[in-house]
């Protein structure tokens, strides 16, 4: 697997107007990476994500994208999707093709074929003509992932993909993301506030907190001391069958 | 009805009402889905102020309306949520435009009539030239829809994803507002601000109430506006009622009908299950 960088943050300061959210960010996302971004609410996860996606310009520093034609497959938070629009799953996924179709052009047969392929890939081919708003949480998440895949992305970027899901749905979505990473060799960046979920799947962890970003392998990053300092509450990390389990508070 | 349509001013009124309705109803679907109903009414009111200013200063009314609309459109497209909420800016623009419209016509000996005509329009007095202009506007919108429907829909539906895919979301928003500004400038002097606003909101609401597909939402909204526009003019002539309010009443009745149809369909489905 190649490891050339797709994106490099070089001493980047991020914020809005005069308000600085993150300082001196050093981060690199390479081909084949599976990076998890975690941190308390309001710490700057979304800000970092926006900068990564190129929709937020840094206050200072440089974000380099060495390779031309980098395509993001962005999966927004399910709750942020406006369900007033009477869109079907097929129409939703087709949106992922729009940038490739271009201006003044209508979707072609191959674009519709990509939609079906993306839907089959995430096991929702039977839902293509259903209205998006009538789906379950897990099915909606699969639709959003299929839309991102329809763009034929270089990097899949997921924002809180398992938020508000029950355990089986959460597990199914994370297994799907793992499959996309392993079998399809997709580079994946995932933001989540669910430490246990992220820790079980990603290879590297970026922890956002106190206006800083620290990045490293999961085993190095997930320590009780680091998380206790970050969250301001006692946090312990145990290992069960090789997986890290994070416990907060006084529970034993 | 054939007798009524034999008179050219009634025929012109029906065509003008149908064209202004179709254009506004089509745009109304985007306005509702983008949740910018109050931006819509504020731009319509600013266009009305333009008509009043044009009337007062002896300028071309549609040009004056477009000039002022352009200022409003630019302001709304560039204004971002900050310390002052966007709703406040919209409210101030609407209130100021309404007040200045009335001030512009207050010194006119026919002031009250002018105000009524600006609010409800004067569709029975529409000229052949105005018809051509409205026809051209409707044709231009069809072309724009053919060319840019997917971009307008995508940037309205998911601005964040569109931005990550390289779309200039703010530019598309400005483009949409500009279309609104042009459409209002050309149609508000024909149909009046209240009627245009009703065309903008009621047919799109009715289509969303029916819960049809995205493409059908546009089609149903335009169809409702066309039916209400034509029937409103004819009924007002038949029963000697003011035309603008009759069109709005027809739109409201059709919305009610759509709500009833939806409820009945739902009840029938429940009883079938």
Image (spheres, rainbow, N blue to C red):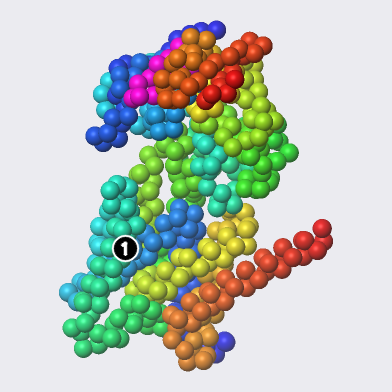
Which residue is at the front of the view, B1 or B95?
Answer: B95
Name above or below for residue A230 compared with residue B98: above
Is residue A118 part of the magenta span, yes or no? no
Q: Is residue A107 visible?
A: no
| The image quarter in which residue B65 lies | bottom left
Q: Position of residue B235 (x, y in %)?
A: 53, 86
Chain under numbered label 1: B
> What SS does tag 1 mark?
helix
Left of B158 or right of it: where is B270? Answer: right
Q: Nearer the viewer, residue A145 or B199?
A: A145
Left or right of A178 in this view: B226: left
Image position, residue B261 (x, y; %): 67, 69
The residue at the point 45 percent across, 70 percent down is B198
Report the predominant secondary structure element of the magenta stretch: strand
Q: Taking the image as drawn, is residue B223 in sight?
A: yes
Please name the residue shown 40% across and 16% down the image.
Answer: A214
Residue B125 vertical placement versus A26 (above, below): below
Q: Place residue A242 in its image quadrant.
A: top right
**Residue A183 point in image, percent of width and height:** 64, 16
| Residue depicted at 66% across the width and 38% down the height | A139
| Residue B6 % position (x, y) | 51, 87
Above or below — where is B151 with respect to B105?
A: above
Label 1 sits on residue: B91
- Looking at the rendering, the stretch of residues picked out in magenta corresponds to A205-216
**Label 1, residues with CA under 10 Å away: few <14, some 14-19, many ≥20:** some
């Amino acid at each position: 697997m190649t490891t050339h960088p797709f994106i490099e943050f070089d001493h980047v300061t991020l914020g809005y107007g005069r308000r600085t959210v993150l300082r001196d960010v050093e981060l690199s996302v390479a081909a084949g990476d599976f990076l998890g971004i975690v941190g308390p609410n309001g710490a700057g996860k979304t800000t970092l994500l926006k900068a990564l996606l190129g929709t937020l310009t840094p206050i200072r520093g440089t974000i380099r994208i060495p390779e031309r034609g980098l395509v993001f497959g962005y999966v927004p938070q399910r709750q942020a999707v406006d369900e007033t629009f009477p869109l079907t799953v097929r129409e939703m996924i087709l949106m992922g093709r729009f940038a490739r179709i271009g201006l003044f052009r209508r979707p072609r047969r191959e674009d519709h074929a990509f939609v079906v392929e993306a839907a089959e890939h995430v096991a929702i081919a039977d839902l293509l003509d259903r209205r998006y708003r009538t789906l379950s949480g897990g099915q909606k998440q699969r639709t959003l992932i299929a839309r991102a895949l329809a763009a034929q992305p270089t990097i899949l970027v997921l924002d809180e993909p398992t938020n508000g899901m029950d355990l089986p749905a959460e597990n199914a979505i994370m297994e799907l993301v793992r499959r996309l990473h392993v079998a399809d060799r997709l580079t994946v960046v995932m933001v989540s506030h669910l430490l246990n979920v992220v820790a079980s799947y990603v290879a590297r962890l970026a922890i956002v907190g106190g206006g800083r970003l620290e990045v490293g392998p999961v085993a190095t990053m997930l320590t009780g001391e680091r998380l206790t300092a970050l969250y301001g509450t006692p946090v312990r990390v145990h290992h069960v069958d090789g997986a890290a389990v994070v416990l907060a508070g006084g529970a034993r | 009805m054939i007798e009524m349509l034999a008179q050219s001013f009634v025929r012109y009124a029906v065509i003008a009402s149908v064209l202004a309705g179709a254009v506004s109803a089509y745009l109304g679907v985007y306005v509702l889905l983008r949740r910018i109903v109050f931006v819509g009414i504020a731009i319509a009111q600013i266009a009305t102020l333009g008509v009043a200013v044009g009337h007062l200063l002896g300028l071309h009314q549609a040009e004056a309306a477009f000039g002022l609309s352009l200022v409003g459109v630019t302001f709304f497209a560039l204004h971002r949520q900050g310390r002052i909420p966007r709703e406040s800016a919209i409210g101030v623009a609407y209130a100021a435009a309404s007040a200045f419209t009335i001030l512009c016509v207050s010194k006119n000996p026919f002031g009250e009539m002018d105000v009524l005509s600006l609010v409800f329009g004067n569709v029975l007095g529409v000229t052949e030239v105005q018809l051509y202009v409205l026809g051209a506007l409707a044709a231009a919108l069809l072309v724009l829809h053919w060319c840019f429907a997917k971009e307008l829909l995508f940037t309205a539906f998911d601005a964040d994803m569109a931005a990550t895919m390289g779309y200039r979301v703010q530019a598309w928003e400005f483009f949409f507002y500009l279309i609104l500004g042009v459409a209002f400038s050309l149609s508000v002097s024909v149909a009046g601000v209240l009627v245009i606003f009703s065309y903008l909101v009621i047919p799109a609401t009715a289509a969303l109430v029916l819960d049809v597909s995205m493409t059908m939402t546009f089609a149903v909204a335009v169809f409702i506006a066309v039916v209400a526009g034509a029937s409103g003019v004819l009924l007002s002539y038949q029963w000697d009622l003011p035309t603008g309010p009759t069109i709005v009443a027809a739109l409201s009745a059709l919305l009610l009908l759509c709500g009833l149809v939806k409820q009945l369909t739902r009840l029938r489905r429940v009883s079938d299950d």
